[in-house]
Image: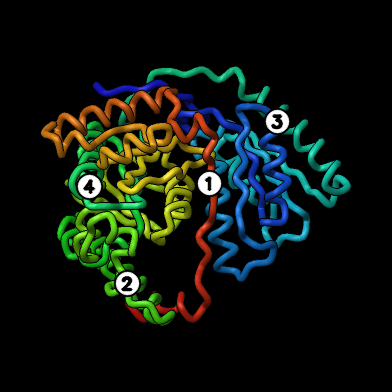
Amino acid sequence: MAEFTGFRRADGSVGVRNHVAVIPTSVSASALSRRIGADAGERVRATPHQMGADQPTPAREQTERVLAGIGRNPNVGAALLVELGTESIDVEALADRIAESGTPVETLSIREVGGTAAAIEAGRERARSLVAEVADARRETADASELVFGVECGGSDATSGIAANPAVGNACDRLVEAGGTACFSETPEFIGAEHILAERCADRATREWLLERVEMRENMAQLMGVDLRGAQPTPGNQEGGLTTIEEKSLGAISKGGTTPVRGMVEYAERLPTGGGLVLMDTPGYDVESVVGKVAGGAQVIAFTTGRGSTTGNPIAPVIKVTGNPKTWERLSNNMDFDASTVISGESLSDVGERLFDLLLEVASGRLTEAEYRRLEEFAINEIQPEELVGLRGEAR
């Protein structure tokens, strides 16, 4: 039986980290939240982002879904919500959504406490109080079926589709076999291989939704004068040896393994537990895509890169996987797993097994290189203007 050790939460989920999250409700409170996170102790993690204080309703609702999802992620033992005080987001209602999971939550209004200096001091005190509240949590043994594993790729090259992505896919298959949940996203990177994913969908509704979302992403790009099929692969991908969008997409979808697609969810929507492979509709921007999966409940992320990437996340550990032996050597202080041994003769099954073992080790507390160096990027996907979002209805 595959097991790990984690922190059992009030709602029954299991965290692989025991963070106190400092969550700003807008960009206006983000710099201050970063200061609080830096000053309040090693356990505290801030999630500064770029979203404005007064967003259109669809954008605000998505931002609220992300922030609530971050606060409810099992890796968060407690949360401090920080607002300027002029945002359209109701900070108390947001706190209530997070508290529904049993997570301790406090709020802080910069305007109410008297400005930046007072808010930093008050934020430090409240964050330290929350740290003390979760400090007694202890790891306990949990089954691998309780893991939600998000997988991502960025800076891809020819080795990504040959080695790194298939190795991650093999690890996903092993987790699904153990009863866990795997998720991959970046809908624009399904283009050219969407028919293969569609054939793997467990039901007609999932298949139709998948194809609709791929079409919608293409239509949105065309309205902005971009032909995704003609613009991909990117110059960097081409330099790394990728020649067509189909080649890139075939490699990208291999990181999800070979099991049936159980379903598909919206950006940052709660990922279903209980096992299986699930897709999330996200943009191709790595940081926003990772944040969406973490807000959906992923406790651990695997990030494959051929050309190299330093992307991390403040809430979930990011396991950096490369299939390029030169990247493994040059970026040794950013990479966690060398999948290039697939190219030199090690079986994909053996490499996937080693990566699955690393997943369980990281879930049990082993730090990733991104965690060790506190590389903690965070950004929220911004909904396109209303006329572009309207394409969803046209596609149906």
How many C-alpha atoms fall within 10 Å of the one at disc 2: few (<14), some, or many (≥20)? few
Q: Secondary structure at mark 3?
A: loop
> Which amino acid type corresponds to the residue marked 1 in the rendered image?
Glu
Q: Position of residue 140 (x, y in %)?
A: 43, 18
- Do the residues under discs 3 and 2 have CB atoms within 8 angstroms? no
Front disc: 2 or 1: 2
> Which amino acid type corresponds to the residue marked 3 in the rendered image?
Ala
What residue is rendered at 24% in x and 45% in y?
A: 165
Q: Secondary structure at mark 1?
A: loop
Q: Earlier in the sequence, mark 4 or mark 1?
A: 4
Q: Which residue is mark 4?
A: 159
Q: Secondary structure at mark 2?
A: helix
Q: Is 211 drawn above or below residue 40 in the view shown? A: below
Front disc: 3 or 4: 4
Q: Earlier in the sequence, mark 2 or mark 4?
A: 4
Q: Which residue is mark 1?
A: 377
Q: Position of residue 23 (x, y in %)?
A: 64, 45
Q: Which quadrant of the rendered structure holds the N terminus?
A: top left
Between 335 and 143, the one lying in front of the other is 335
How many C-alpha atoms fall within 10 Å of the one at disc 4: few (<14), some, or many (≥20)? many
Where residue 231 is drawn, which disc sits there?
A: 2
Q: Secondary structure at mark 4?
A: helix
In 3D space, how far apart are the residues under numbered discs 3 and 4 (Cα atoms)?
Answer: 41 Å
Where residue 40 is drawn, which disc sits there?
A: 3
Q: Earlier in the sequence, mark 3 or mark 2?
A: 3
Looking at the image, residue 186 sits to the left or right of residue 91; the answer is left
What residue is rendered at 33% in x and 77% in y?
A: 227
Front disc: 4 or 1: 4
Q: Which quadrant of the rendered structure holds the C terminus?
A: bottom left
Looking at the image, residue 65 sits to the left or right of residue 221; the answer is right
> Which amino acid type corresponds to the residue marked 4 in the rendered image?
Thr
